């Protein structure tokens, strides 16, 4: 009996897929990437610049055992199916597996699982392909670019201003945030006023005088208008127009991140983690199955079968009047149409029926994806919009209102759309109306708003920088590096974020910008399409970039360390705050002539009496910042524990208790209780 080996990325998928395929197949997981660029060679880039930018790959430390196990499985198998994720990253992982495991060309097949459902998995196995080397080269080029820019610029900023890192797209995203902050700081508010006529059943706002737009900038101008107005308003025009309100297309990666942030309050990182879980498979009692299609996509295409099933569902649940039309991809650069939009794998698996098997947050996201996909195929909503103009001494006031004539897709999607529907009473032309009140209000123009996660992702998408699958990581990195902080769920750049941006713009303004980054994304797409040679793109970039880096190392001024106001007790020079591998410390500014380092007095946190001597158990930290608990009499007493000891004894054996993973456990026996 032949043995077929299927290698996927995620362990959570492997058992599900193995059940679908049966006894002739064994499914194992690589647990993601198994190799990465080395950090050896010139500049530690792991790239041989002189040999056509040939990358040097090494096994990831935690993957050496997995590689060894996979090699054994490969030797014992007749055919290898490389079934990593269906995108450029997944294609590259398949290539690395083939290369690292020594798989011959005639002994492997590449399969793409766009859905983790039995019929789609079986169909994919029947229609295998080979690794698309152009996609691999595109991903490889992206990785090498990111390595060169990241390593070189990060080292530059670390040595000159103490910043933590820089990146090809990360630094451009940070520049957007910094530029917006400067717009806000430079903004000068302008005063303006409004006048609103309040009637019994509606309101109308002043907008024109004798047919020309009217702006009121001061209270004096408002008072002048109010003096001229009479008590009576004449309705001089009434316009009714039926408008269609179109449903939105199904989700792609970027719009899912944006809308989940706005409507559900989910950070992009959380959204993608939940979507990954929904794609890889959920135990729904009768089976384990993927609930959504692959979640890294920028195409709004839907399969014919899904459209057919969804239309049947719409007709059955809401009636044939609610059937709409299929939305197609508009002409848009950088769209990879190999994938469908993000959609449920089965219309029959409604959110309500899946709710018992999902966490609260996973349910919210699944319901959103399901509702959006179905609603995208429903008919437009129709509203009757009414606009009336009232005249008073040549001053025109406008009132608007609308009535929902047909709810269309809103029948299903209304929970995710805000509606400001206002009704107007039955009004006729030439009617006269008397206002019961004239309301004057002072306003000031507002500066542009800081970016939320959703707005930043939308901006990056529209500008064509980065890829949808990288947005969450970019945002996460900006937070981790302390380049931004969140205020009212909006990005505010920190001092180090602003300084990093300014230094990069001083020396790399023509490289670290939107236009250059977008052009590079287009070149990566051309490599994927086979229309550009990958190492030619790298050489053109490197020949421009590296001389500039060397010049920046020479010309960029090094930031002076911050003085503490104290003098060195050994040489009398000022003490300064320096940054080291394990955080900040205070030292002499006259280093290396004077090597004085001030010993910081750390606040001692006493946990309990030592159970082994008369000392105290103190909360301590390792050099890398990990917390542990040790005796104050160390090294005389060597008591130490990673788990927090508690000042009470085990009721069964009398030894001390510890707190671990939400449980109170005995340090000696098997006794435990809830914390």
Image (spheres, rainbow, N blue to C red):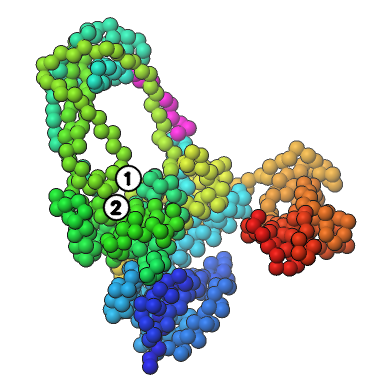
Residue at 50% in and 62% down: 148
Percent from the top left, x then y, of residue 443?
38, 22
**CB within 8 Å, label 1 to label 2:** yes
Q: Residue 281 in the image: x percent, y percent?
A: 40, 67
- In which quarter of the view is residue 560 placed? top right
Residue 416 image label? 1
Furthest residue toward bottom: 1
- Residue position marked by numbered label 2 in the rendering: 372
**Among numbered discs 1 and 2, the one appearing first in the sequence:** 2
Q: Residue at x 20, y 65 (%)?
A: 304
- 477 or 609: nearer the eye? 609
- Number of residues whose C-alpha sits closer than 10 Å to that of mark 1, classed few (under 14), some (14–19) or many (20 or more): some
Residue 192 in magenta? yes
The residue stretch that appears in magenta: 184-193
Percent from the top left, x then y, of residue 564?
A: 73, 40
Image height check: is 111 above or below 344? below
């Amino acid at each position: 009996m032949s043995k077929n080996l299927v290698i996927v990325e995620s362990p959570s998928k492997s058992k599900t897929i193995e059940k679908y395929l049966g006894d002739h197949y064994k499914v194992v997981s690589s647990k993601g990437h198994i190799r990465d660029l080395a950090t050896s060679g010139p500049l530690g880039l792991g790239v041989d610049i002189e040999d056509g930018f040939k990358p040097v790959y090494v096994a990831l430390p935690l993957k050496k055992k997995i590689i060894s196990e996979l090699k054994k499985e490969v030797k014992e198998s007749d055919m290898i199916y490389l079934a990593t994720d269906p995108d450029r990253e997944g294609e590259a992982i398949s290539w690395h597996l083939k290369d690292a495991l020594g798989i011959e060309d005639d002994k492997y097949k590449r399969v793409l699982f766009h859905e983790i459902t039995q019929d789609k998995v079986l169909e994919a196995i029947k229609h295998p392909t080979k690794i698309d080397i152009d996609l691999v080269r595109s991903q490889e080029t992206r990785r090498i670019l990111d390595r060169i820019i990241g390593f070189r610029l990060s080292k530059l900023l670390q040595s000159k201003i103490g910043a933590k890192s820089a990146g090809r797209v990360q630094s451009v995203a940070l520049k957007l945030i910094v530029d917006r902050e400067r717009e806000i700081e430079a903004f000068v508010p302008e005063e303006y006023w409004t006048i609103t006529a309040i009637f019994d059943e509606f309101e109308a706002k002043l907008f024109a005088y004798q047919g020309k737009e009217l702006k009121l900038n001061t209270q004096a101008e408002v008072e002048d208008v109010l003096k001229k107005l009479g008590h009576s308003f004449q309705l001089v025009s009434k316009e009714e127009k039926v408008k269609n309100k179109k449903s939105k297309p199904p989700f792609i990666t970027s719009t899912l991140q944006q809308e989940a942030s706005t409507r559900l309050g989910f950070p992009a990182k959380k959204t993608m983690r939940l979507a990954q879980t929904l794609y890889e498979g959920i135990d729904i009692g009768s089976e384990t199955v993927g609930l959504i299609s692959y979640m890294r996509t920028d195409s709004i295409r839907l399969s014919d079968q899904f459209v057919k099933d969804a239309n049947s569902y719409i007709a059955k649940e809401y009636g044939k009047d609610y059937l709409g039309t299929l939305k197609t991809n508009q002409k848009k650069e950088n769209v990879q149409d190999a994938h469908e939009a993000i959609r449920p794998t089965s219309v029959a698996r409604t959110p309500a029926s899946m709710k018992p098997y999902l966490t609260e947050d996973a349910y919210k996201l699944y319901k959103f994806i399901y509702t959006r996909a179905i609603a995208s195929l429903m008919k437009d909503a129709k509203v009757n919009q009414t606009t009336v103009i009232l005249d008073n001494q040549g001053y025109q006031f406008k009132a608007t209102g609308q009535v929902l004539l047909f709810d269309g897709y809103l029948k299903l999607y209304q929970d995710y759309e805000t509606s400001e529907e206002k009704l107007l009473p039955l009004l006729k032309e030439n009617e006269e109306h008397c206002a019961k009140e004239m309301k004057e209000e002072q306003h000031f123009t507002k500066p542009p708003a800081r970016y939320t996660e959703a707005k930043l992702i939308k901006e990056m998408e529209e500008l064509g920088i980065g890829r949808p699958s990288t947005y969450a990581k970019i945002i996460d990195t900006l937070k981790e590096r302390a380049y931004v902080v969140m205020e009212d769920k909006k990005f505010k750049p920190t001092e180090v974020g602003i300084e990093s941006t300014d230094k990069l713009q001083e020396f790399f303004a023509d490289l670290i910008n939107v236009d250059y980054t977008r052009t590079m994304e287009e070149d990566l797409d051309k490599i994927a399409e086979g229309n550009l040679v990958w190492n030619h793109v790298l050489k053109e970039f490197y020949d421009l970039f590296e001389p500039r880096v060397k010049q920046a190392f020479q010309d960029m001024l090094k930031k002076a360390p911050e003085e503490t106001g104290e003098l060195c007790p050994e040489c009398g020079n000022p003490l300064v705050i320096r940054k080291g591998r394990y955080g900040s410390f205070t030292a002499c500014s006259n280093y290396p002539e004077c090597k004085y380092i001030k010993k910081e007095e750390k606040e001692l946190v006493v946990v309990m009496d030592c159970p082994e001597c008369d000392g105290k158990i103190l909360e301590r930290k390792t050099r890398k910042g990990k917390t542990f608990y040790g005796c104050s009499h160390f090294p005389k007493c060597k008591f130490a524990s990673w788990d927090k000891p508690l000042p009470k004894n085990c009721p069964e054996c009398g030894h001390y208790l510890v707190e671990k993973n939400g449980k109170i456990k005995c340090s000696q026996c098997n006794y435990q209780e809830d914390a």
